[in-house]
Image (spheres, helix red, strand yellow):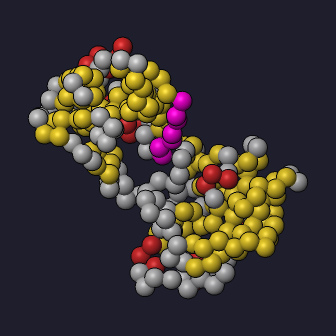
Amino acid sequence: MSENASSKLLPNQKWIRGFVGGRPVVDSRNVMGVWDQRHYPSWYFPADDILVALEPTDATRSIEGFGPAAVHDLVVDGTSVPAAASILIDPTEEELRGRVRLEFDAIEQWFEEDVEVFGHPKNPYSRIDVLPSSRHVVVRHGETVVADTTKPTMLYETGIGARIYVPPTDVRLDLIVPAERRTTCAYKGFANYHSLVIDGETLNDVAWSYPTPFPEARQVAGMLSFYTNKLSVEVDGVAVTT
């Protein structure tokens, strides 16, 4: 384990519950947030707060910065949820001994207090600032102007470059078609993606939008943000590359 592993631990004071098939599988007010991945923590629970059986497997997984962990299935009403849980085999940090790491995607529903959480556990050190702006934003593909606005909304998220959202009234919507891709953000909500069709050529997934974003990002509802590595985006005449 790395020398600064203890700095990757943060007790989570929120009441956390998880459900599979409507059945509660974990109910805890003693959660440890552990930075064993890059952008957000994993949740580690006391074994007594797991409400269903843990079934050991022969598998192990490596937890970055914390060493090997024994993989377990969750058994919910006789049905196994495979590889849903891990227990560190020999943790250096006393706070993690006997705690159970649950894979976020293996649990169907998560709640912080009485608010459902989507995508992944939230990083308490991250925040979103959504600011209306009067910067001049132009989006192009070759010689074609796809969007041109002086009414963008700038979304700043900790650790991520600024994202520029354009009102749909300032976008060439006749060139924009829905794409199949969908993603989930724990802070902003459920994103739809859009492709660009010009002269019979289709550029897939060049933009995204949040039709009904979570409250933190409600100001960008229905607006479009464009990938700067797929289209040319300029702000006040300066090219944006991040």
Of all residues shown, which one is farthest toward the top?
174
> Is 150 left, or right, of 202 in this rendering?
left
Q: Is residue 45 left or right of residue 186?
A: right
Q: Is residue 22 left or right of residue 200?
A: right
Compare residues 40 and 138 and report the one nearer the observer.
138
Query: Residue at image x 67%, y 53%?
Result: 106
Q: Is residue 225 above or below residue 123?
A: above
Residue 57: % across, % down: 79, 70
In this view, 62 is above or below 170: below
Residue 32 on the magenta span: no
Q: Is residue 65 visible?
A: yes
Q: Residue furthest left?
A: 237
Tell me, yes or no, if residue 151 can be seen here: no
Q: Quadrant of residue 155?
A: top left
Q: Residue at x 69, y 73 (%)?
A: 60
Q: Is residue 55 above or below residue 134?
A: below
Between 69 and 19, the one lying in front of the other is 69
Magenta residue check for 182: yes
Vertical relation: 110 (above or below) 42: above
What percent of the width, then of the height, locates residue 123? Answer: 43, 57
The number of discs equals: 0
> How far across and how far down the image is residue 137, in percent?
19, 30
The segment highlighted magenta reads 180-186
How far across and how far down the image is residue 66, in percent? 54, 78
